[in-house]
Image (cartoon, rainbow, N blue to C red):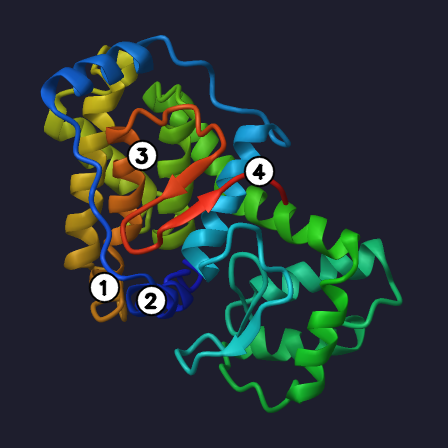
């Protein structure tokens, strides 16, 4: 599994706590939950790529990753967390190889781009699993920010995130019978942060299967989606507080508000992710117009 994407989120959350303060949790009463359940029962199919709901999911990711309401393509820093440089919309890592794959895609689309000259070094770092940023240097930081001005590079960042995490989430949502946009967002965010593969011990697939076992089924077999999603978040938070993924024991417990924020949306009945949408918990950001 690639290095997970929670590193930057913890810093953003701490910043939000200091600048915004505490925020209230949207907890619905029983009547509200019954109403939400009736709405999710007839929810539309999960959104197609490029739809307003997908754009909203990308912006929710930006809230979680950077405390911003639009994707931060130019973001790049060394967090000294084993990742090397962490950069772009979802935190592509120079150590793990996903940054290399992105740059190779960019090379194919624009062979003379400003990042092409770093391909050999990125390959070496990925092959060795090295977190060293010295070989890339400060010039790489400047060139990454230049590349982020290119619409083609921004599109490739979004595509990479969707191909790696949203596509597996769509597949699992179909298998589980999850029909709402919010349900897909929960799967997408779990895949992005905790892993998308069946062998990820804290990942999306594992958590979904544990949720099914706990409830004796899933929405595809007749379990109410609102009930299933609430249990999914409960299971997810247990994994976040006591992860089996190596190296995540310090940062994941501090980021349970990522899951809590998504559950608050469910408690408020925001199943279709329509704008304006306020992402609560410790983030407290309102997405007025979804955009990439």
Tell me which label, 3 or 1, sits earlier in the chain. 1
Q: Residues within 10 Å of mark 1 (few under 14, many from 20)?
A: some
Label 1, label 4: how many angstroms apart (C-alpha)? 29 Å
Give the mark toward the camera: 4 or 3.
4
Q: For residue 289, which numbered disc appears in the image?
A: 4
Label 3, label 1: how many angstroms apart (C-alpha)? 20 Å
Residue occupying image coordinates x 39% and y 45%: 189
Q: What residue is pinned by disc 3?
A: 265
Q: What residue is pinned by disc 1?
A: 254
Q: Residue furthest bottom?
A: 134
Does residue 149 appear in the picture of this structure?
A: yes
Pointer 1 and pointer 4: residues touching (CB < 8 Å)?
no
Tell me which label, 2 or 3, sits earlier in the chain. 2
The local secondary structure at tag 2 comes to helix
Q: Residue furthest front?
A: 20
Does residue 196 appear in the picture of this structure?
A: no
In the displayed structure, would residue 117 be above or below residue 49? below
Residue 176: x, y in percent?
Answer: 33, 23
Tell me which label, 4 or 2, sits earlier in the chain. 2
Residue 226: x, y in percent?
Answer: 24, 22
């Amino acid at each position: 599994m690639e290095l997970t994407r929670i590193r930057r989120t913890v810093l953003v959350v701490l910043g939000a706590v200091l600048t915004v303060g505490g925020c209230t949790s949207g907890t619905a009463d029983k009547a509200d939950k019954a109403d939400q359940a009736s709405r999710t029962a007839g929810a539309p199919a999960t959104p197609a790529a490029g739809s307003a709901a997908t754009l909203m999911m990308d912006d929710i990711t930006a809230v979680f990753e950077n405390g911003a309401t639009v994707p931060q393509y130019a973001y790049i820093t060394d967090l000294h967390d084993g990742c090397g440089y962490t950069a772009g919309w979802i935190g592509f890592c120079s150590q793990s190889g996903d940054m290399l794959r992105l740059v190779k895609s960019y090379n194919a689309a624009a062979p003379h781009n400003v990042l092409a000259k770093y391909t050999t070094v990125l390959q070496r770092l990925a092959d060795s699993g090295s977190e060293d940023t010295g070989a890339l240097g400060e010039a790489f930081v400047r060139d990454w920010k230049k590349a982020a001005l290119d619409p083609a590079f921004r599109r490739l960042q979004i595509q990479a995130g969707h191909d790696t995490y949203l596509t597996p989430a769509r597949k699992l949502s179909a298998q589980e019978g999850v029909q709402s946009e919010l349900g897909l967002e929960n799967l997408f965010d779990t895949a992005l942060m905790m892993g998308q593969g069946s062998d990820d011990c804290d990942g999306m697939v594992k958590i979904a299967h544990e949720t099914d076992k706990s409830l004796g089924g899933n929405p595809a077999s007749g379990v109410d989606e609102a009930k299933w999603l609430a249990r999914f978040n409960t299971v997810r938070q247990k994994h976040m507080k006591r992860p089996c993924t190596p190296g995540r024991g310090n940062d994941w417990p501090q980021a349970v508000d990522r899951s809590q924020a998504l559950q608050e949306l469910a408690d408020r009945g925001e199943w279709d992710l329509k704008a304006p949408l306020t992402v609560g918990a410790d983030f407290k950001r309102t997405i007025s117009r979804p955009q990439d």
